[in-house]
Amino acid sequence: MTRNDMATISDPEISTLIDNYFEVLWNQDMELFDRVFHKECVLYSAQTGTLNIRPYAIYRDAVANRVSPANTPGDVRADSVLMFNQISPTLALVHAQLQMFGGLMQDYLNLVYLDGQWWVMAKMWERVGDAVK
């Protein structure tokens, strides 16, 4: 794995959550998925010109039933935290970048502290280019 962060995450629990986030998307460990994404989370994208909304259950099913980037020939793992802002003791925002399925993806992750841990509560994502090999 290559990780080239441009921002430092000051909270160790949030740092662990983001490490787990990158791991989930690369290897598709569904037990870890359930510890990263809150069951009420929603994903959003409008890159095709149409709003794409994926609630937790739909996103989880999609991830569980696809070939992982780790098992996709030619994919090279490269994760980065581009921006971090902890707004309060219970709310934070992370701008993440990763490569998967031949694309360079950027995500805005809205994090919330609930039930004694940090969760991804909302994700806005976009493919911003081709993966760098």
Image: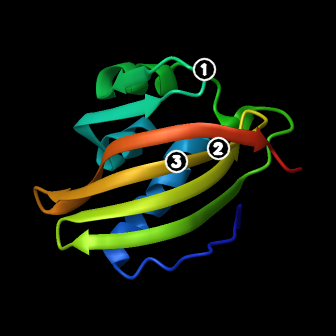
Image location (x, y in percent) of residue 133: 89, 50
Q: Measure the alpha-carbon separation of dots 1 and 3.
A: 16 Å
| Residue at left offset 52%, top offset 48% | 107
Disc 1 to disc 3: CB gap under 8 Å: no
Looking at the rendered structure, the kind of residue marked 1 is Thr
| Residue at left offset 44%, top offset 70% | 84
Disc 2 to disc 3: CB gap under 8 Å: yes
Image location (x, y in percent) of residue 29: 48, 40
Q: Measure the alpha-carbon separation of dots 2 and 3.
A: 7 Å
Crowd tier of the residue under label 2, counting other residues whose Cα lies within 10 Å: few below 14, some 14–19, many 20 or above: some
Crowd tier of the residue under label 3, counting other residues whose Cα lies within 10 Å: few below 14, some 14–19, many 20 or above: many
The numbered mark, 2 or 1, whose residue comes first in the sequence reads 1
Disc 2 to disc 1: CB gap under 8 Å: no
Residue 107 disc label: 3
| Secondary structure found at label 3 | strand
| Secondary structure found at label 2 | strand
| Residue at left offset 17%, top offset 66% | 90
Relative vertical location of residue 84 with respect to residue 129 in this rendering, above or below: below
Residue 105 disc label: 2
Q: Which residue is mark 1?
A: 48
Residue 126 occupies quadrant: top right
| Secondary structure found at label 1 | loop
Q: Measure the alpha-carbon separation of dots 2 and 1.
A: 14 Å
